[in-house]
Image (cartoon, rainbow, N blue to C red):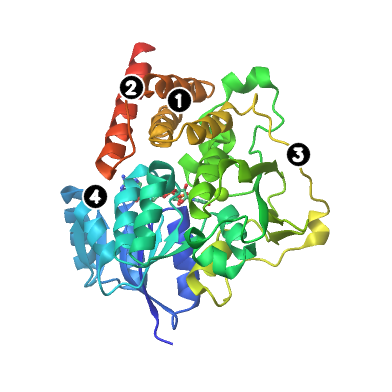
Amino acid sequence: MAPQILTVLGSTGSIGVSTLDVVARHPERFRIHALTGATQLEKLHDQCLAFSPRYVVVLAEPAAETLRARLRASGSETEVLCGEAALERVASDPAVTTVMAAIVGAAGMRPTLAAARAGKRVLLANKETLVLAGRLFMDEATRCGATLLPIDSEHNAIFQVLPRAYREAPYAGTLCAAGVKRILLTASGGPFRQRPLATLADVTPEEAVRHPNWSMGRKISVDSASMMNKGLEVIEARWLFNADVDDIAVVVHPQSIVHSMVEYVDGSVLAQLGAPDMRIPITYGLAYPERAESGAASLDLFSVGRLDFEAPDLARFPCLRLAFEALRAGGAATAVLNAANEVAVAAFLDRRLGYTGIPALIDAVLAECEGQTCAESLDALMDADALARERADAWLGARR
Ligand code: NDP
Ligand code: MG
């Protein structure tokens, strides 16, 4: 079989590095066409030497110049491009078959959309694309014949246990017609599942990024601690699987072994289990519909011992409640939620905002933007994103 030709958007991040780890295990199956990063130039340099891509993309010209000089000195022939247009170009290049969308945040939306519009096989890690522009993105992916393979572990699990015809064309039918009663989205509950509520205001960035089961980038780690990550994932599932908000239930499962489940009308519940290692869903996406070695350890059920499940506590995790409310509100509310959350998390990581300030800020921004945004076009959604960021900055400024 001809090898897949890959662009890895966000190759220096947690998902990007795991993707390259899997690619290196199967040199006959995958070739790297382009890599992209933002700040970690030395890591990008090393990745270029290891994978010899045709292109590498960074955000700004000074970084491009530095990387160019480093690569030239190392004898690399990789061409350095820069800027957002270059990200879209390497995501839609006719030479590319497959795009791993692993930039973090709303910044990943345009290149991911470019890949979908070019009809690529899109391995979707960047959940913010669907939170910001779910309907538009799914419409474009369907219209342009893109193949979407979810990489988020929960969505990858759900994809694996849905009927094949449905998962490959969810908008050609309905969950109900496919015999599905509901989607059970599992959540670890993060590091603060049992922490006394009165001490949440004292949470530090170091505590928030220390996830009990997964090793991930800083932004998603904070989202996991606040359970905003699960809120974003409910929205992601709504769009990926053409599900109604009421078709999706969140189940807290602290061991992160059951990665999600689908309940069928006959009462059967199908689950996908595995070690908490992102190389498993990444390899599934890369090899689909085949299977390949991922490098992940075998699941040792005897050392796991037990699997627990509990209902989510919306008083402890107001971000999850806010995400459900935004999804029900519709329009551009989830774009506002996403942007406000990005500003709040960045401020928290910078120690400009306390941990309990995260939901307070998002709640205030959602209220302020109500009735002032619409989701009719990409421009309208980007306007909603910009308005929310502006209001979030003003909210932070007023408390300084
Ligand atoms: P990281 O923070 O580890 O990596 C983010 C990547 O995006 C890096 O390559 C970074 O470059 C690049 N980047 C950051 N800002 C920009 C920007 N403005 N423009 C272009 N590139 C940028 O994130 P993760 O790998 O953890 O997550 C990536 C995505 O995957 C997120 O959307 C996350 O929600 C999702 N995801 C991640 C999971 C995980 O286990 N990590 C699990 C499920 C989903 P640099 O590092 O060079 O600055
Ligand atoms: Mg997840």
Q: Say which quarter of the image contains residue 335.
A: top left
**CA–CA distance between discs 4 and 2?**
26 Å
Sooner in the amino-acid sequence: mark 3 or mark 4: 4
Type of the residue with mark 1:
Ile
Which residue carries the number 3 mark? 310
Which residue carries the number 4 mark? 59
Sooner in the amino-acid sequence: mark 2 or mark 1: 1
**Label 4 crowd bin: few (<14), some (14–19), many (20+), radius 10 Å:** some
Disc 4 on helix, strand or loop? loop
**CA–CA distance between discs 2 and 3?**
36 Å
117 or 45: nearer the eye? 117
Q: Say which quarter of the image contains residue 378.
A: top left
User: Is ligand 1 within 8 Å of the beta carbon of the residue shown at mark 4?
Assistant: yes
The percent position of residue 163, horizontal first and vertical second, equals 62, 66
* Residue 18 in the figure: left or right of residue 38: right
User: Is ligand 2 within 8 Å of the beta carbon of the residue shown at mark 3?
Assistant: no
